[in-house]
Image: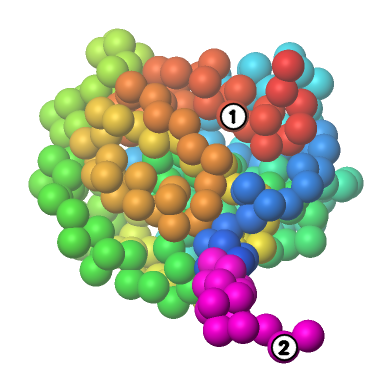
């Protein structure tokens, strides 16, 4: 039977829509793979201890959980630190990144052990994308003005840390987090991803609506672009500390272990 013009046009539109969905992300279309392993990566102005509250909840749910210590030197070295931990996992693994470490999740997430990705107020670039240029298309978040450099080593000053990074964390606790922040090297900020794991792995995203470190609308854009299952948390950039129940629940969902 010959297809008439209207039917042919409809088929073309449907095909284009299907193609677009296939390239955006897999959260809505891939079958969920159950995972018992969770790997957590941290970003700038932090170390692996920032995941403590979430780890407690994941372990209580019976999940094998590991926090990566990001060297914060160069993107390839940071990605390598994640890959070494992924290599040790014994099966399907949910890879989770906060803040800058979304770069690492996006690159290392193609690892065969990774079954799902979770981004927590995190960068989520496309392959080869200039994230800095992307971020500049949105209003500059206040925390950016608080970065202090000693030569090639950068850190967040105390006032900006307490106000713009950990704004909804109790001051006494925020000061402890400030004391243990790991400085980063300028070279880290120049790296670009060569992969975009969210194009082939189911993805989840937690937007921090009160974020003063990454613009919340930029977070929403990245989450929508990847087709991620998205939640919004009324939190500062440190939702993993101020709202660990919500973040842990999102990770459990990605692992197929949600109650």
Residue 165 vertical placement versus 219 (above, below): above
Name the magenta segment's main secondary structure.
helix
Q: Does the magenta portion include 12?
A: yes
The secondary element bearing badge 2 is classed as loop
Residue 179 visible: no
Residue at 20%, 32% in the rendered image:
164
Residue at 52%, 52% in the rendered image:
227
| Magenta segment boundaries in residue numbering | 1-17
> Which colour scheme appears in the figure?
rainbow
Residue beneath label 1, please?
Answer: 250
Q: Is residue 29 left or right of residue 146?
A: right
Residue 84 visible: yes
Query: Residue 59, percent across and down?
Result: 73, 21
Q: Does the magenta portion include 113?
A: no
Q: For mark 1, does the 10 Å Cα neighbourhood hold few (<14), some (14 to 19), or many (20 or more) residues?
A: many
Residue closer to the observer: 121 or 26: 26
* Quarter of the figure that contains the N terminus: bottom right
Q: CA distance from mark 2 to mark 1?
A: 49 Å
Query: Residue 168, percent across and down?
Result: 28, 18
The secondary element bearing badge 1 is classed as helix
Choose the circle earlier in sequence order: 2 or 1. 2
Residue beneath label 2, please?
Answer: 2
């Amino acid at each position: 039977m010959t297809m008439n013009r209207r039917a042919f046009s409809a088929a073309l539109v449907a095909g284009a829509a299907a193609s677009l969905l296939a390239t955006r992300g897999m959260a809505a279309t891939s079958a969920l793979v159950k995972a018992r392993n969770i790997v957590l990566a941290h970003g700038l102005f932090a170390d692996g201890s920032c995941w403590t509250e979430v780890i407690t909840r994941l372990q209580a749910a019976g999940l094998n959980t590991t926090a990566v210590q990001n060297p914060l030197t160069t993107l390839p070295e940071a990605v390598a630190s994640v890959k070494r931990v992924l290599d040790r996992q014994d099966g399907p693994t949910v890879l989770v990144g906060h803040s800058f470490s979304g770069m690492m999740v996006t690159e290392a997430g193609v690892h065969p052990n990774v079954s799902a990705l979770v981004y927590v107020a995190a960068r989520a670039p496309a392959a080869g994308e200039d994230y800095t240029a992307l971020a500049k298309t949105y209003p500059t978040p206040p925390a950016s003005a608080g970065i202090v450099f000693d030569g090639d080593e950068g850190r967040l000053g105390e006032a900006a840390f307490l106000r713009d990074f950990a704004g909804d964390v109790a001051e006494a606790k925020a000061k402890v987090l400030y004391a243990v922040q790991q400085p980063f090297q300028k070279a880290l900020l120049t790296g670009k991803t060569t992969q975009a794991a969210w194009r082939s792995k189911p993805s989840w995203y937690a937007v921090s609506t009160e974020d003063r470190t990454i613009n919340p609308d930029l977070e929403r854009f990245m989450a929508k672009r990847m087709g991620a299952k998205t939640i919004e948390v009324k939190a500062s950039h440190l939702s993993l500390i101020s709202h660990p129940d919500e973040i842990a629940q999102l990770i459990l969902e990605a692992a197929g272990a949600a109650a």
